[in-house]
Structures are given as structure tokens and as C-alpha cells.
Image (cartoon, rainbow, N blue to C red):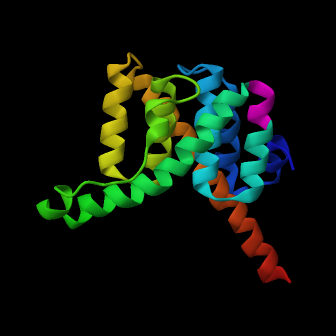
Amino acid sequence: MNLEQIRLALPEAAKDTKLNLQSVLEQPSTLSEAQRWGVAVASAIAARNPVLQEAILEAAQARTTPEVVDDAMAAASLMAMNNVYYRFRHLIGKASYSEKPARLRMNRMARPATTKADFELMCLAVSAINGCETCLASHEKVVLEANLTEDMVHDAVRIAATIMAAAVSLEMQVMARSEAA
């Protein structure tokens, strides 16, 4: 199923998501094509819906470079680890945990295949999906220091939010089919 087929197949209850999915990925924004699709791939992986992941990946491969796709996958993987770890430290709120070294490898953050700013933007989008306040603040700071704008951050998070909504909407379809059977 391609992205347009997914969009058209979303249930009526997800009409806004259907419209938003088209607009955040296809209409001009403050993000470059590479940034838009890198954020989309990383977000689809974080949203954990295989049908949506496959469709977003297929669309991204037609619109951007393999390096962008590779960075998006790496960002999703790293944030799956970091968002759990740093969210734990933040939520527990004990200084003793914050003083302990993470000892988690994150070499890819220092050497992305594309640019540091774009990789961090992908990490920010995944952190928004995963709800890690510490990571959100850290990645937002880095992208702004790299001369990306608040509008760009906003557009990246809009993509992440819409892709998460699409994943939930696809799950609603599965539930509806199960109930009908």
C-alpha cells in the first residue's frame, strides 16, 4: 500500500488526519525536501506501524537520498534508547541518577551521513513522539544553534504529530475489522 492509498483508506473518523497527512508532506514548508522526508521516515519508525513505515519509506526513497533515509533510521533507533533513558532520569528526578554516566553509545549523533542539524531535527521529531522532555529541549537547542528556525522545528513536529495520528488511525481500521468479523 502506498502513502496515497493509506491516506485515502483512513476511516471517516480520521478525516482531519487524512488531510493533514497530505499537507504536511506535500505542501511547501520551511523544511527542505530532505528534512521533510527524513523527519517523516524517523517519525514513521517511531510510530511503529509497519504499513505506514513501508509507505513512508517508499515515498521518501523516491524523493530524497539514501543518506537521508539512513540518518532517519539511525535517529529513530538512537532515540528509542535515549528517550527511554533520559525520560526515566527526568521523571524520577533524583540527582543521583543524573550524576551517573549514561554509558550508552551515540557515535552516530557526532557523525551523521547528512548534516548534524538535519540529524538533530529528526531526533527532535522522534523525541516528540516518544514524549521525552529532556531530549526535546536538548535537540531543539542544537538545531536552533545550527541556524534552523523555530518555524522549522514547528514544521518537523507537525509532521511527527500527523504521522503518529495516521498510525493510530490505521490501528482503528484494524480494530473496526476485528469487531465486524
Q: Tell me: residue 116, above or below residue 89.
A: above
Instruction: Decide whether residue 159 is among the magenta residues.
Output: no
Most extreme residue toward the left, as rendered? Answer: 95
Q: Is residue 70 above or below residue 53?
A: above
Residue 95: x and y in percent read: 12, 60
Residue 3, x across and y down, in percent: 79, 43
Q: Nearer the viewer, residue 27 or 147?
A: 147
Please name the residue shown 81% across and 29% down the image. Answer: 62
Q: Please tell me how many numbered marks the rendered image carries.
A: 0
Left or right of residue 117: residue 159: right
Q: Main secondary structure of the magenta part?
A: helix
Q: Which residues are magenta?
A: 59-63
Q: Position of residue 28 (x, y in %)?
A: 63, 20
Quarter of the view holding residue 58? top right
Question: Can residue 125 be seen here?
Answer: yes
Residue 11 in sight in this render? no
Residue at the farthest top position: 147
Q: Is residue 60 magenta?
A: yes
Residue found 51% across the figure and 26% down from its top: 118
Q: Quadrant of the C terminus?
A: bottom right
Which residue is pictured at 69% across the width and 66% down the height? 171
Q: Is residue 136 above or below residue 166?
A: above
Q: Position of residue 158 (x, y in %)?
A: 52, 38
Query: Of 147 and 154, which appears nearest the observer?
Result: 147
Left or right: where 94 falls relative to 166: left
- What residue sits 55% from the left and 50% below the top? 77
Q: Nearer the viewer, residue 129 or 6?
A: 129
60 vs 114: above or below:
below
